[in-house]
Amino acid sequence: MFNITVHDVEEIKKFYEKVLEFKIVTEQKYDNGWHFVKMEMPGGTAINLIKDEKAKPGLMKIYLETSDIKKAYTDLKGKGAKPNNEVKSDHWDRPVKWFDFSDPEGNQWVILQF
């Protein structure tokens, strides 16, 4: 599980529900403006969306691995993600195919197939 700091919790929450199929586990709003949403994606990976006036959004870079990069690309694009590139083939520590996209607040998601 990891925390993602955001400006607009309602907008970003919709993106994660629609595009990545995360489900809301719990949500809490506080009088001081702090807003916390725990979301879980199929398979159990969880994230926390946090609105915290003291932190700067858009700094996360998240890597997820898939067994079918072309399907992941097509599925995410069909749900409204705007890939920053087509599927690329590279050699990092081993051969890899990948593409990336950003959520509405600039957090980058890199989808990999080794």
Image: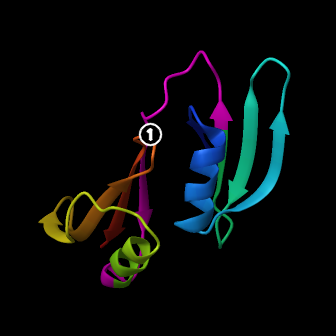
- Residue name at image x 62 percent, y 56 percent: 14
Toward the viewer: 52 or 65? 52
Q: Residue at x 66, y 35 (%)?
A: 50
Q: Secondary structure at mark 1?
A: loop
Q: Quadrant of the C terminus?
A: bottom left
Vertical position of residue 33 compared to residue 90: above or below: above
Report the side of 40 relative to 81 (left or right). Answer: right
Q: Is residue 99 magenta?
A: no
Q: Which residue has dot 1 on it?
A: 60
Residue 46, horizontal then vertical, whole percent: 66, 55
Give the amino acid type for the residue marked by disc 1 in the picture.
Answer: Met
Q: Quadrant of residue 73?
A: bottom left
Given residues 19 and 71, the one toward you in this image is 19
Q: Residue at x 40, y 81 (%)?
A: 67
Image-quadrant location for residue 85: bottom left
Q: Give the magenta part as a residue range.
A: 50-70
Instruction: From this view, report whether residue 82 is shown above or below residue 49.
Output: below
Where is 1 relative to 105, above or below?
A: below
Using residue 58 as the reference point, say whether residue 13 is left or right of it.
right
Classify 10 Å Cα crowding around label 1: few (below 14), some (14-19), many (20 and above).
Answer: some
Q: Position of residue 101 (x, y in %)?
A: 34, 56
Relative to 42, is 107 on the left or the right?
Answer: left
- Queried whether the magenta region covers residue 51, the answer comes back as yes
Colour style of the rendered protein structure: rainbow
